[in-house]
Amino acid sequence: MPSISFEVFPPKTLDASFHLWDTVQALSPLTPRFFSVTYGAGGSTQSLTQEAARTLRRQSGLPVAAHLTCVGASKADVLKTADAYAKAGITDIVALRGDPQDGDTFEAHADGFADSCELIEALAAQDQFAIRVGAYPESHPDAASPAQNIEFLKRKCEAGADEAITQFFFEAETFLRFRDACDRAGITAPITPGILPVANWSRTKNFAERCGAAIAPDLAQAFARAEREDRAALFALTHATELCDTLITEGVEQLHFYTLNRPDLTRDICRALGIVADANLQNVA
């Protein structure tokens, strides 16, 4: 069976806090490698992310990978945040450039890191973090070409990244082609596919459009038909399970699920793959 990990986002309201903790309670018995806690767009939830990561680590004892970006902060402030994570027992970092705060173009802070490679180098120099980075099987929107996209991932790995986690995708071949291209480029760090269970097709289409994840026409039609026929949840479970099963058959050993703080579909996919909950870990918080 593959190893698994889950991404959650920090709560902004009391109700959202319940969703987060329900998600952790539901998924932790599946013994994930870690939970990652994401930033909002433009670094909009930095303080919430930091607090959620520390609280999750303190109250649950689970491994937590906290997101850290270059957006809107000096180098000193970013490294101060990293140090606070380490003091809280969080030694896994997902190091990202981050989305632009305003507009479509990223602009580094006057005293900040110019890009994720500089951030990774600084974290690696501290020699106290496992560093994960983002990867884009259909190319990052800012990359001039697929080759440049892969070259930048190689730079991040050479800067000190231990693992890459991909943006979500809908076809196994998308990831497999990317993995092969990375191998040809000499990238040796593990590349973990990111899986987005489709709990809401309309929302997922919007996500895909923003990040450049291609949707084949026949897949779009199938999801739309499943919604009309009131079997969207079953179709989403089937599609994601088949996607993951193909990846596993092709040698993938780790899967990362974007849960959107809604655990049921992710948990059902894991069960369908034969990933069994540990009965001794039913309550973690």
Image (cartoon, grey):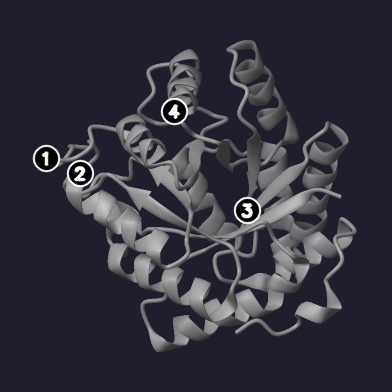
Q: Which mark is residue 196?
A: 3
Amino acid on which the number 3 mark rests in the picture: Leu
Which of discs 2 and 3 lies nearer the camera? The answer is 2
Tell me which label, 2 or 3, sits earlier in the chain.
2
Distance from disc 2 to disc 3, alpha carbons, whole Å, reads 32 Å
Please, what is the three-letter code of the amino acid marked with disc 2? Lys
Which of 44/190 is in front?
190
- The kind of residue on which mark 4 rests is Lys
Please give the residue where the numbered disc 4 appears in the rendered image. Answer: 156
The residue mark sitting in front, 4 or 3, is: 4
Residue drawn at point x = 59 percent, y = 73 percent: 61
CA gap between label 2 and label 4 equals: 17 Å
Distance between mark 3 and mark 1 Cα atoms: 35 Å
Q: Which disc, if any, is residue 75?
A: 2
Q: Are marks 2 and 1 in contact (CB under 8 Å)?
A: yes
Q: Is residue 79 visible?
A: yes
Residue 99 at x, y = what percent? Answer: 31, 45
Between label 2 and label 4, give the one nearer the viewer.
Answer: 2
For the point 77% across and 37% down, the residue is: 252
Q: Earlier in the sequence, mark 2 or mark 1?
A: 2
Q: Residue at x 76, y 82 (%)?
A: 282
Among numbered discs 3 and 1, the one appearing first in the sequence: 1
Query: Please, is residue 100 above or below residue 160 in the view?
Result: below
Q: Which mark is residue 111?
A: 1
Q: Earlier in the sequence, mark 1 or mark 4?
A: 1
Q: Residue at x 72, y 39 (%)?
A: 218
| Identity, as a three-letter code, of the amino acid under mark 1 | Asp
